[in-house]
Amino acid sequence: MAEVRLRFRHVSGDLGPFNFAETCTVDDIKERLLKEWPSDGPMASEPPGQASDIKLILSGKFLDATKPLSEYKRDMGELGPEDVVTLHVVVRVTPASEKKTAKAGAIAASGESPAGTTGSSAGCGCVIS
């Protein structure tokens, strides 16, 4: 099984390089990155709360969390045993209000009403003109 060495470049600094098997999914890579995220220094000012807050970019494209690393080999080019691939990292923390909206949307889709509320519609009453 082949391995790929990855370095992660964030606006506040770099992490890695770390070795990953080609069979690892992007989600597995994000989980490892979350564990390795520094708790001090410039990168500590913008820590991801969960792996889904981390967005990885290779060759100008966001990587799909469900795909294995092997599907991005074409974008990495020919790699020697000591070569390192740099992925750009963006942290997009989901605000609590968006998490609540997503939960309300899921409740509305299921036909249930949130605890302590009446009515059949979930959502805002915003009007955009």
Image (tube, grey):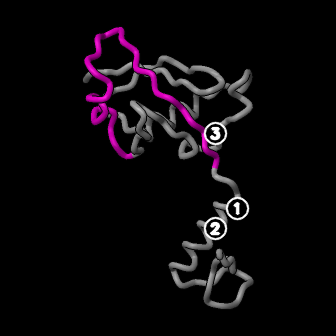
Task: State if disc 2 and disc 1 touch (CB < 8 Å).
Answer: yes
- Where, by quadrant of the figure, is residue 97 drawn? bottom right
Nearer the observer, 118 or 75: 75
Above or below — where is 23 with respect to 82? below
| On screen, residue 104 above or below 19 | below
What amino acid does circle 3 point to? Pro
Residue numbers of the magenta segment: 66-93
Q: Which residue is mark 1?
A: 97
Residue 123 magenta:
no
Q: Residues within 10 Å of mark 3 (few under 14, many from 20)?
A: some
Please provide percent x and percent y for residue 82: 35, 8
Q: How many marks?
A: 3
Disc 1 marks a residue whose amino acid type is: Ser
* Label 2 or label 3, whichever comes before in sequence order: 3
Residue 117 percent coordinates (x, y) = 72, 85
In the picture, measured across the screen, residue 121 lies left or right of residue 8, that is: right
Label number found at residue 48: 3
Alpha carbon distance from label 1 to label 2: 6 Å
Residue found at the very far top of the displayed protein: 82
Q: Nearer the viewer, residue 119 or 75?
A: 75
- Please tell me whether mark 1 sits on a helix, a strand or a loop: helix
Splitting the image into 4 quarters, where does residue 121 fall?
bottom right
Foreground label between 1 and 3:
1
- Quadrant that contains the C terminus: bottom right
In space, the residues marked 1 and 3 are separated at their CA atoms by: 17 Å
